[in-house]
Every structure is written in structure tokens, then in C-alpha cells.
Image: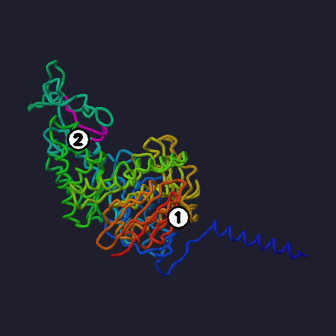
Amino acid sequence: MLNKKSMVKKSIAAVCLLGCAGVLSAKPKKYKTVQPELAVTELAPVERKASKPGEGVYYSLFVRSFADGNGDGIGDFKGLTKKLDYLNDGNDLTVTDLGITGIWLLPIFPSQSYHGYDVDDYYAVNPDYGTMEDFETFLAEAKKRGISVIIDMTCNHSSAYNKWFIESKKPDSPYHTWYRWITDLDFTENGGVYNRKQKGLAGNIWTIDLSNPVVDANGKTVLDKSGQPVMNYYAGLFSTNMPDFNMDEPAVRAEFKKVFKFWLDKGVSGFRFDAAGHVYNVAEVKPGSETLTKAVEFWKEMNAYVWEEKPEAYNVAEVWEPTATRARYMGGMQSNFHFDLGTLIPNIINNQEINDKKNQPEDMDKSSYNGFARSLAGEYAMYARNNPDYIDAPFLSNHDQPRSSAALRNNPAKIKLAADMYILAEGVPFIYYGEEIAMKSGADDPTKRTPMVWKPAGKDKLTPTWCDSGAYGNVSVYNKKTVPVSEQENDPDSILNHYKRVIRVKTAHPALYKGRLTPVPCDSAVLESWVMECDEEKAFVVHNVSSVKDVTVPLPEGCDMPMVYAANPAAKVEDGKITVPAMSSVVLAQMK
């Protein structure tokens, strides 16, 4: 017979066991209405208002690595379609989805490489990823959920196996002028203007075509002064397998417009223009030629055509150049990726941690305060001078860069703060797949493109295994300790659930997804703050980058508004003051 004391102990143990089990297998709450008040401090449903292709939050993904729908080890359109509800289920009353509003697909065309940036055929899909019908089904399902889809478009170069390039090898072919061809006689040592040893990004720019000597009108091989055959050469900035187009050729421009129309008609919402800063690369044109102005005019023409076909299309360009050059390209672009944030934001957070450990007093020179906000505003001003309607595209890392978790020391608090700092800035932020669960990488490209971690190893049939063969090195090792989606979904404090929260606040507030930024400093060296404002709404955004110090300061004039987001629930606004806990962000907002 149990005594009373024993019964109490067993009852407590049973309650504890049930409670712990509830935490470990927590099911998402179900809601009948949106909960904006609850969403201030926890993951809760909100009305997501960002709906146009050029609004909201995008998710960049590598199809090969995302989800395998047919069990062959390679990610594909069917797998991606099955995982759409993870990205956005189309229901504002749920909190199980990430909440993104757009997807950028890395190259989906037939290609000789695993990455796909050498395009064999611009009018087809990579058979590794499925059929055109599979792609169309994916687009239709994305549209049902309110997700815009843009696809990677490589206009700078094609594959060396593209039929256009193969045809271009014939001097009398109409395709010959589609690419940048020269001969031995065009090099400086033979009286020409081109440098035979000019370097590209992976060796020499100029590649000899050994199968294709220059011939005269009678079909005889032309010989140089030493009696050797005069050979043809083509330009390839990135690789010998990626010959560069000649964008001075009107037929090339016309063909790409046909390509754009083909995919817009399929239902894509726009394009991510790869290597946009290289279409007139100084290394492969005649010395003294104007390159930047011609490139801007080229992109202005291409974008204008896309908008003629689809007025609400969203196009974003890769111009991996210093800010001043990126700003010039804005004259021909709608949106450019904001390179450097993946270095700048971690540096701000890590350097402040060093200062905190030194117990270093705040700088009394207040002119140095709010440096990140002032830096952003300066760059935006440069963009605006070239295009008043610019859309910035901030991001932390992409398929060409080490994943951001390493720069943030794999520290969850830093990763969450960094997410807030770029997502709550101007424009359309791009999340690289796996960033929301803190996936890791090495320095080599394949390690930056490894499969999404859905469940613990070996427990998910949708996880691609293409990189397990060893052909790309031991790349899978980098994410053996990454906490998978399935586990992070059940942890209210996980990085994944933090991303869900900040994405929801971004897409629910017009000031955040289409407003312009104005630095508004607070009276603290560790606070970065700004106002975001559009016609409908005003918001005040503040980040505390200190690793240890909660900060209470007077609210700047005109910023005393309701709190709509607090990364840390200890944040508060009262009596004209705001308290921002260490390593966290707060957003105040009000409709006008």
C-alpha cells in the first residue's frame, strides 16, 4: 500500500514526465484569428500584407540540395513541391511555415556541371530535376500559396556545349558573332590590341580552339609569319567551359528577350541576373572601350523588356563590386544584391563582444554612434541618385560564400541578431536555404551547397544524397551536428522559430517591406536604430549589439509608438523610454 508521501512524489513525477513529453513533441497551436499582440513576444500568426513580387522576403535555394522527390539522391521539382508548405503554406493562421513570399531558384537549365551556371539549353529544364511538367506543377503550387518564383539567368556566358556556341565556331555561321572570337593576329605581339596572357577568374581569358584554325576564302588554313596555323580563340572569364557572349550583337539581345518571354509565360515572376557586372568585362574588350556605361544601358534594355511583358516582375542582379559601382548599375537595374553585409554585420556584433569583455566604457563622442544605420543610409543615397525606385536586396551569405554561421561563431544569439539586422533593413532580404537552421560550410564551393538538413541523418527519404559519393570531397561532414528542421520546429527558442518571427513582422508591416530608411540615433553606443517609413506606416527599428548590457534610453522624438516586435520579451516601452535587452531587436510601428 502506498503512503501519502509516496503518492505525492509519484504524481509529481508523472506530471513532470507528461510536461517534458509535451515540450519534446510540442504541436503547433491552432488559431482562429491572427494574433498581432501575441506576436510581439512569441511566434504567433499575423496578417502578412507583402504580396507583390518585389516585396517581402525571398528564399534562395539550390534544387539539387533541397528535397529529393523520387529517391535518386538528387533534389528535384517534385521534392521542392512537397516542401512548399515548409516555406509558406498560404495560410496566415498557421505558424508551421517559414513565411517567405518569394523563391529564387539557382540554375534549373540542362548543364554539364552540378551547379548549373554553364547553360546547355535556355529553353529546357535540367533532367536531373524532372520534367517541364514537374516545373510547371511546382510553379502552380507556389502561386496557390502566394509565393513568387524568380529563376537564375546567366546572360554573361553559356556552356561550351550549348548549340549556339558550337555553331559559332564556324566563321560563316550567323552565330559566330554571338560570342567573343579573335585570332592569333589580334594579339599584341602580332600587331593586335588584345593581351594573350590576360587573366580571368580561373586562368587566361582567351582559350584556343585547337579544332578550329583560321581558313581563307578558299578553305585553306591561314599561316602566320613562322608558318604556323593561325588559330581562333574565344573569351571565357569564368572558365574555358563558359564562353562569353558578345552583347554588342543585336541577335544575342533579341534571343535573350525570347528566353525571358518563354519563362515569364511559364509563370516565373522575374529573374536573378548572374554575373551582371561582367557582360562588358574590361578584360575581354578592346583597351579603352567604355564598359560600365554600356553594361548599364544593356541591363536597362533587358529590364524594360521584362516589365513590358510582366509589369510587376521583380529582377535582381549580382553585381559583386564596391558600393559605388553597384550604385552605378542601379541606373539599369531594379534591384542589386547588397554585398558586404555578410562581413559587416558579424564584424559589428563580434567587435562589440570584444569591447564588452574588456568592460570598455562607451565612446563619449556621440558622432560615432549609429554607424551601421548611417552606413546603410549612405549606400541607399548612392542608389537613389541612379534610380529613385531602387530596391535593395540584403543578404548574409549565398552559394558562392561561406555560410554566415561561421562568421557569427555558431552562436545562436548572434545568428538571431544578425538575422534581424539585415531582414529589418530596407528592401527584399534573401535567406540562403539552411541559414534559418544555422547550416555550416567550408571554403570550397560544394560545401556551401550541401543538402538541406530536414531530419537526423538517415531518417528522411527527402534529403538528397548526391554529394555523399565522395566526388566533391567529404562535404557532408560540415552539417553532421546541425540541428535539423524537425527538432528546431519543436523548440520555441530555436533559430528556425526566430526566423519565422522576424519574417512575419517584416511581411506584415508596409513600412518594413517597402519603406525608406532614415538613421535616428539613440543615446547609446551599442544601439543601432532607424526609422522606416512609407505612405501608410512609420516604424522605428532598434538593435542592441552588446552581448551583455541591457539598455534603457529615451525614445527619439516621434518614435513613441506601439511595440510590434520584441526579439526578447523583456523589452519594454514606458514613460517615453525604451528598454532593449542585450543581443536583441525591437520594432515599434503605427499606421498613419
Q: Residue furthest right?
A: 1
Q: Quadrant of residue 548?
A: bottom right
Q: Tell me the magenta residue range.
A: 231-242
The secondary structure type at the circle numbered 1 is loop
Residue 239 in the magenta stretch? The answer is yes
Nearer the observer, disc 1 or disc 2?
Answer: 1
Q: Is residue 276 above or below residue 11?
A: above
Residue 457 is left or right of residue 276, and the answer is right
* In front of the other: 337 or 465: 337
State the residue at coordinates (26%, 33%).
207
* In front of the other: 308 or 466: 308
**Residue with the mark numbered 1:** 568
Q: Considering the image in quadrants, where does the N terminus appear?
A: bottom right
**Residue with the mark numbered 2:** 281
x and y percentages locating residue 426 in the rendered image: 34, 60
Cα–Cα gap, marks 1 and 2: 47 Å
x and y percentages locating residue 372 in the rendered image: 38, 53
Q: Is residue 475 above or below residue 83?
A: above
